[in-house]
Amino acid sequence: MTYKYEIILYWSKEDSAFIAEIPELPGCMAHGASQEEALANIHEAIQLWIDTATEFGDQIPEPKGRRLMYA
């Protein structure tokens, strides 16, 4: 399944890995040795996040479909 959530991808020197985060899904993160691996892993993490939220009756945010802004 394809999700339209914004993905933030960055290199973590501390973890020696690429980190992928979904800001709209609190705590939804994945890592990988390459950018491609981190992106593949985040898709699995999104599905697990949604499955868990569904199981517990938590609301699943709709993707905003635009770039999020941070200060």
Image (cartoon, rainbow, N blue to C red):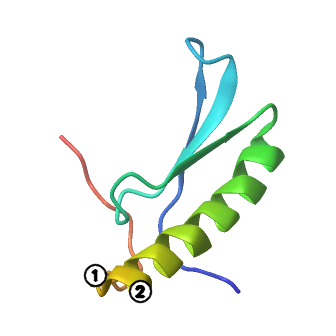
Please give the residue where the numbered disc 1 appears in the rendered image.
Answer: 58
Q: Report if residue 63 is visible in the image.
A: no
Q: Amino acid at mark 2?
A: Thr
Q: Report if residue 56 is visible in the image.
A: yes
User: In the image, residue 65 lies at what x, y percent?
Assistant: 41, 80
Q: Quadrant of residue 2?
A: bottom right
Q: Quadrant of residue 11?
A: top right
Q: Quadrant of residue 68?
A: bottom left
User: In the image, residue 66 lies at what x, y percent?
Assistant: 38, 73
User: In the image, residue 24 lies at what x, y percent?
Assistant: 34, 65
* Distance Cα–Cα, label 1 vs label 2: 6 Å
Answer yes or no: do the residues labelled 1 and 2 have beta carbons within 8 Å? yes
Residue displayed at 68% across by 65% down = 44
In the image, taking residue 45 as reference, residue 23 lies left or right, namely left
Taking depth in this image into account, of 11 and 56 the one nearest to the observer is 56
Please give the residue where the numbered disc 2 appears in the rendered image.
Answer: 54
Taking depth in this image into account, of 45 and 39 the one nearest to the observer is 45
Q: Amino acid at mark 1?
A: Asp
Residue displayed at 34% across by 81% down = 56
